[in-house]
Image: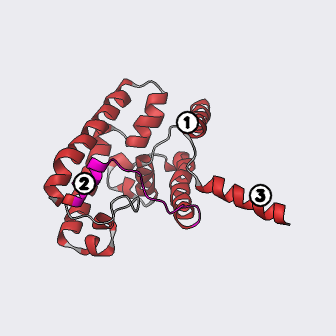
């Protein structure tokens, strides 16, 4: 019985640790190979289009008028992301500090952020108080609009382009991913200081 408890403890410890790149990378590659083999494309933003089409938006807007039943399989991605996120946060999270660069910590603390690196989602942006403020609502509305516009304009989201598109060796996906990184740098170095400074 002692051996079983010790082995169970070791297994749980292994599960709670982040998986290394040499496990995750091949799993992503294998998933993409299977999707390509079966003629499917992966992406989160396409699910929103599918859900809108399911709700009848195709009667009003031509963009949503397509055979959504052929895309039902992709909705499992959204369901899996929600369920997997819940399981990860509530059952598989190992409460350890995030090892951030000291310069990043100092920059965020200068904006008045407390406990930097103590959680994956900073309460200064994601807490009920922050989301209930005028600034929080503005960030949600403007950010949501920009994400929706950018996804439509780029013909896909970060997961669709960076994983599926690059796996297909599509030049537009390479360009989109470069744009995502440039956008991330602009957000980090210019917009976050402007919003929270």
Identify the residue under disc 3: 7
Secondary structure of the residue carrying tag 3 is helix
Q: How is the image coloured?
A: secondary structure
The label number, if any, that marks residue 8 in the structure image: none
Question: Mark 3 or mark 2, which is nearer the start of the sequence?
Answer: 3
The location of residue 94, given as percent across then percent down, is: 54, 61
Observer-nearest residue: 23 or 38? 23
Secondary structure of the residue carrying tag 1 is helix
The location of residue 23, given as percent across then percent down, is: 61, 39
- Magenta segment boundaries in residue numbering: 91-109
Disc 2 from disc 3: Cα separation? 41 Å
Disc 2 from disc 1: Cα separation? 32 Å
Q: Is residue 93 magenta?
A: yes
Identify the residue under disc 2: 106
The residue at 47%/35% (across/down) is 164
- Image quadrant containing the C terminus: bottom left
The residue at 48%/27% (across/down) is 168
Observer-nearest residue: 5 or 184? 5
The location of residue 190, given as percent across then percent down, is: 16, 46
Observer-nearest residue: 107 or 62? 107
Identify the residue under disc 1: 25
Q: Is residue 85 left or right of residue 178?
A: right
Whether residue 73 is visible here, answered yes or no, is yes
Q: Is residue 15 left or right of residue 42?
A: right
Q: Quadrant of residue 105?
A: bottom left
Which of discs 2 and 1 lies nearer the camera? The answer is 2
Question: Mark 1 or mark 2, which is nearer the start of the sequence?
Answer: 1
């Amino acid at each position: 019985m002692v051996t079983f408890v010790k082995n169970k403890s070791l297994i749980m410890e292994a599960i709670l640790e982040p998986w290394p790149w040499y496990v995750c990378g091949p799993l992503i590659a294998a998933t993409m190979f299977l999707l390509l083999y079966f003629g499917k494309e992966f992406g989160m933003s396409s699910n929103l289009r599918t859900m809108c089409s399911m709700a009848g938006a195709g009667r009003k807007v031509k963009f949503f008028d397509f055979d959504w039943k052929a895309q039902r399989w992709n909705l499992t991605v959204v369901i899996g992301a929600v369920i997997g996120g819940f399981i990860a946060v509530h059952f598989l999270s190992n409460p350890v500090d995030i090892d951030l660069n000291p310069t990043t910590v100092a920059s965020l603390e200068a904006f008045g952020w407390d406990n930097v690196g103590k959680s994956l989602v900073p309460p200064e942006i994601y807490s009920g108080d922050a989301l209930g403020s005028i600034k929080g609502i503005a960030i949600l509305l403007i950010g949501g609009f920009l994400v929706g516009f950018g996804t439509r304009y780029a013909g896909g989201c970060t997961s669709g382009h960076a994983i599926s598109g690059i796996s297909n060796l599509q030049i537009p996906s390479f360009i989109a991913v470069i744009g995502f990184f440039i956008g991330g740098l602009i957000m980090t170095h210019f917009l976050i200081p402007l919003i929270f400074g």
